[in-house]
Amino acid sequence: MVRQQRLNGTSIIEVKLPLIEDFITGKPLPATPEEKVRQIFTRKLVKEYNYSPDQIQTVPEFLIQKGSQKIGPADIVVFHDKRKTLDNIYMIVETKKEGSSEGVDQLKSYMNPTKAAFGIWFNGKEIVFLQPLTKDPFWREIPDIPKAGETLEDIGLYRKDNLVPATELKTIFEACHNYIYANEGLLKEKVFNEVLKLIFMKMVDEKDISSQVCEFRITDAEMEKVEKGENSEFEIRITKLFNDVKKQYTDVFENENETINLKILTIAKGVSLLQKYYLIETPTDVKGTAFQTFVHAHERGERGEFFTPYPILELSVKMLDPQPDENIIDVACGSGGFLVRAMKHIFNKIDAKRPDLSIAQRDKIKETYARSCIRGIDINPDLARVAKMHMIIYDDGHTGIFAENSLIAIDELTDVALKAGAGALDFGMFKILLTNPPFGTKGKVTNRRLLEQFDLAHKWKRNKTGRWEMTTELADNQVPDILFIERCLDFLQDYGRMAIVVPDGILTNASLEYVRVFIMENARILAVVSLPAETFIPHGTGSKTSVLFLQKVPKHKLIELKEGNYPIFMAMCERIGYVVRGKTIFKKNKQGELIDEKGEAVSSEDDAAIDTDVPEIVKAFEDFKAKYRLGF
């Protein structure tokens, strides 16, 4: 869309505005914040509630007749059928931009002159479902609106075979969080953990094949009882479900006395928002994006831990290219981003390599791989739990994740792993390692018993020939990011490969040259990819970083490589796909139009390609591998 603006009475400036396609009519519309929210709910009405596009009006917006006046227009109107008249209105939807708290009264004013059975107010992060009443208080909130062909009484009577995949989940997760935050008086971190419990219970209930009847549900009648403070079957059912979940997943809920720390009315609201969705059948990119966005927004720690943006996960996994016969570890796994992305990569390869097998047979192979070949460690128990839940959302692999400091002695680490049910652990065990360890000077390691394990925790000096060598004197402290480089190499078997995010100081500072010497004496440097300054700013830090790709090779082979002056792949990633504040940016042509991956103009950001050069870097590295016959 082109907007013309006249300045000084003469000159005209043309401004290209981003467009979004109206889901009902297909017409391109200005992609305002309000319009984006409207399109989210319009899509839900069709894809999740099964209403026909023929019975929905968005463009032009429907004007409500009140006496002799026209009011409105209403953002979305759902009619009983194709006849789009005032007396045939079934639902009215009022949408607002994210964060707006206005509009509920406006919705009621639109509904009053009509026979609308239901109203919905939605701002992208909060949602209200209304039913009009004939007497005071004239309105009541309901748990949801009926799907097409159903009634209010059908809500909550769900079987697993009539759940629906979600078209998007980010707004639902946010709505759960915001309702709890507004009604419970808990700290943000506590709210986050309670939402995770609800999501986890939902997933576990779906996976239970012993019954087709959902336990994670609430009917309108049950909601009324909860609102009145009366005992209900819902409370009994949800308590039993949580107790069953704790028994089944003792590694996730280690405290058998743990409870859902919410009022029953708050739990009921959360269940009402999630209950109709089939998370298992929801596309992995939909639930993964929602989960990662939700986690990143609410769980940044204070010890230097932060989350790895998706483009960096993609870059690292595709350049290492793990295979179905290679096991994987992340020694600072956080919320599990690297592990999930690597697991998906492996699953895609299993599908591609074994088309002769049935889906059920391939799923069995995937399940075996996830349970036996994936390990994750994080020092933060809360993040380790998040990673477990993240893996379960993506089909599993959670049993290999546990909470501990990856820098402790290997025998102690193994004991913790075995007690946690994560399986045996040892140095020289893994073929693939991906990690983004905490960095910064705040959390220096000072424990001498821990430091004694590491060459890089000793003081280094130049010998008479000018070469760096390690002394027997232990340093007083060391930053963890340097120690993690050595520990990662410890975990790799010969010819194992790793990708580690490091602060640029390790690669450039004169005072840290000994670290670079240590790396070159213990590994082949496969590649270094420099990341833009804005990479981690939306996720909590402004550190300038690079991804360092290494391969552990036997010492004699490494000497041969160094004598041959082996090649190293170098790249600078200049476009990460978002700006400093985290807003996604899309590719455009010379005319300023949005384009897709093929370079063709599109009318909506939904169809546009994200503006990042990660795919080009991956392709260049593949060419590099082929040219120099790297053999993986």
Image (spheres, rainbow, N blue to C red):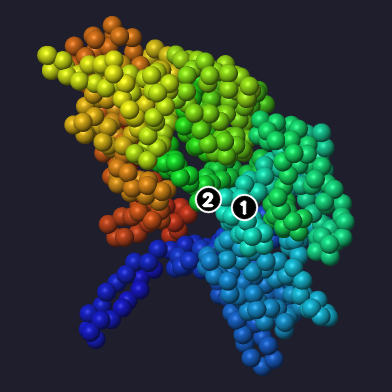
Q: Furthest-top residue in view?
A: 556
At 87% across and 51% down in the image, what residue appears?
233
Q: Name the residue under label 2.
A: 298
Q: Position of residue 600 (x, y in %)?
A: 37, 51
> To which quarter of the image does residue 580 belong?
bottom left
> To which quarter of the image does residue 70 belong?
bottom right
In the rendered image, the vertical position of residue 385 relative to residue 41, given as above or below: above
The answer to whether marks 2 and 1 mark residues whose Cβ atoms lie closer than 8 Å is yes
Q: Which of disc 1 and disc 2 is earlier in sequence?
A: 1
At 29% across and 27% down in the image, what residue appears?
527
At 59% across and 79% down in the image, what residue appears?
73
Q: Where is residue 303 in the image (x, y as percent from the top left)?
A: 44, 41
Q: Given the image, on which type of amino acid does mark 2 rest?
A: His
In the rendered image, the vertical position of residue 153 relative to residue 3, given as above or below: above
Q: Which numbered disc covers residue 191?
A: 1
Q: In which quarter of the image is the N terminus?
A: bottom left
Instruction: Out of 417 and 346, give the one closest to the viewer.
Output: 417
